[in-house]
């Protein structure tokens, strides 16, 4: 298949896929394959079990960030 044969939507999807792949290569996940420590695992379980939730806006405000 040639690029000239692609529809605009197909070309857009092809470019998006290529960009996504490249970003994944460059940025990656530095924690991929690492084990979660017991302390972090316990905090995560407690957090997931809690009913209280805060919004992203509340987190940003606590950290002094602006969206």
Image (cartoon, rainbow, N blue to C red):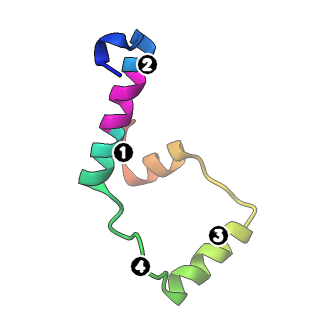
Query: Seen in the image, is 37 located left or right of residue 15?
Result: right
Q: Which mark is residue 47?
A: 3
Q: Earlier in the sequence, mark 4 or mark 2?
A: 2
Q: Is residue 13 magenta?
A: yes
Q: Secondary structure at mark 3?
A: helix
Q: Earlier in the sequence, mark 4 or mark 1?
A: 4
Marks 1 & 3, CB-CB < 8 Å contact: no
Q: Secondary structure at mark 2?
A: helix
Gap in Å between the C-alphas at discs 3 and 2? 42 Å
Q: Earlier in the sequence, mark 3 or mark 2?
A: 2
Q: Is residue 2 magenta?
A: no
Q: Nearer the viewer, residue 60 or 20?
A: 20
Q: Secondary structure at mark 1?
A: loop
* Mark 2 Cα-neighbour bin, 10 Å: few <14, some 14–19, many ≥20: few
* Mark 3 Cα-neighbour bin, 10 Å: few <14, some 14–19, many ≥20: few
Which SS does the magenta portion mostly show? Answer: helix
The picture places residue 15, in percent across and down from the top left corner, at 33, 27
Reply above or below: 3 against 50. Answer: above
Q: Earlier in the sequence, mark 1 or mark 2?
A: 2
* Mark 4 Cα-neighbour bin, 10 Å: few <14, some 14–19, many ≥20: few
Residue under label 1, please give it.
Answer: 65
* Mark 1 Cα-neighbour bin, 10 Å: few <14, some 14–19, many ≥20: few
Give the residue drawn at x 31%, y 19%: 2
Marks 1 & 2, CB-CB < 8 Å contact: no
Q: Quadrant of residue 14?
A: top left
Q: Which residues are magenta?
A: 12-19
């Amino acid at each position: 298949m040639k690029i000239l044969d692609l529809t605009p939507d197909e070309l857009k999807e092809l470019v998006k896929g290529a960009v996504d792949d490249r970003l994944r290569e460059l940025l990656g996940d530095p924690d991929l394959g690492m084990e979660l420590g017991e302390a972090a695992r316990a905090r995560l379980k407690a957090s997931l079990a809690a009913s209280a939730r805060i919004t992203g806006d509340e987190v940003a405000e606590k950290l002094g960030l602006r969206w």
